[in-house]
C-alpha cells in the first residue's frame, strides 16, 4: 500500500500527489495497527497449537507410565519360563520408550 501510494505521489501532478500523500498518511497508521493485531492473533494461535501438542504429549506419557507401572507391580515368579516372559515384556517397554524418544526428535 505504501509503495503504491509513493509511486502515485511521484507520477501524479502536485494536487493529486498531495491528496494521495495525505490519505496515505492517514491509512498507514491504521494499516500498521491491523498488521499488529493480526500478528497477535497469529501468535495466540501458535501458542494454542503448541499447548495442544504439549497436552497430547503429556497424556501419551501418562498412559505409557501407567502401563509400565502396572507391569512393574505384577509379581514375577522365579520359574524360567515366567521370568523369560517378564524379561520380554520389559524389552517391549524399553523399545516403546526408545520409540517415544525418537518421536520427540
Image (cartoon, rainbow, N blue to C red):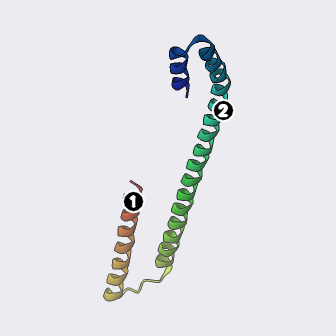
Q: Position of residue 53 (x, y in %)?
A: 52, 58
57 shown above or below 43:
below
For residue 39, what is the image quadrant? top right
Is 2 situated left or right of 85 in this image?
right
Which sits earlier in the primary sequence, circle 1 or circle 2? 2
Q: For numbered disc 1, what is the local secondary structure? A: helix
Image quadrant containing the N terminus: top right
- When the figure is inspected, residue 60 is found, relative to residue 41, above or below; the finding is below
Q: Secondary structure at mark 2?
A: helix
Return the residue nearer the eye: 54 or 84. 54
Foreground: 11 or 100? Answer: 11
Left or right: 9, with 72 as reference point: right
Query: Which residue reaches farthest top?
Result: 14
Q: Which residue is mark 1?
A: 103
Residue located 53% across and 63% down the image: 56
At a point 59% along the width and 49% down the height, the residue shown is 45
> With 41 as the anchor, is 57 left or right in this view?
left
Q: Position of residue 92 (x, y in %)?
A: 36, 74
Residue 27, numbered label? none
Instruction: State which quadrant residue 21 falls in.
Output: top right
Q: As rendered, which of 39 and 1 lies closer to the eye?
A: 1
Numbered mark located on residue 33 in the image: 2
Amino acid at each position: 500500500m505504501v509503495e503504491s501510494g509513493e509511486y502515485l505521489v511521484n507520477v501524479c501532478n502536485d494536487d493529486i500527489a498531495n491528496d494521495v500523500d495525505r490519505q496515505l498518511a492517514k491509512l498507514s497508521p491504521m494499516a500498521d495497527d491491523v498488521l499488529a493485531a493480526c500478528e497477535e492473533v497469529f501468535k495466540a494461535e501458535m501458542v494454542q497449537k503448541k499447548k495442544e501438542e504439549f497436552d497430547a504429549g503429556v497424556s501419551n506419557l501418562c498412559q505409557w507410565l501407567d502401563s509400565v507401572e502396572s507391569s512393574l507391580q505384577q509379581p514375577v515368579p522365579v520359574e524360567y519360563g515366567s521370568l523369560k516372559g517378564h524379561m520380554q515384556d520389559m524389552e517391549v517397554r524399553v523399545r516403546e520408550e526408545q520409540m517415544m524418544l525418537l518421536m520427540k526428535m
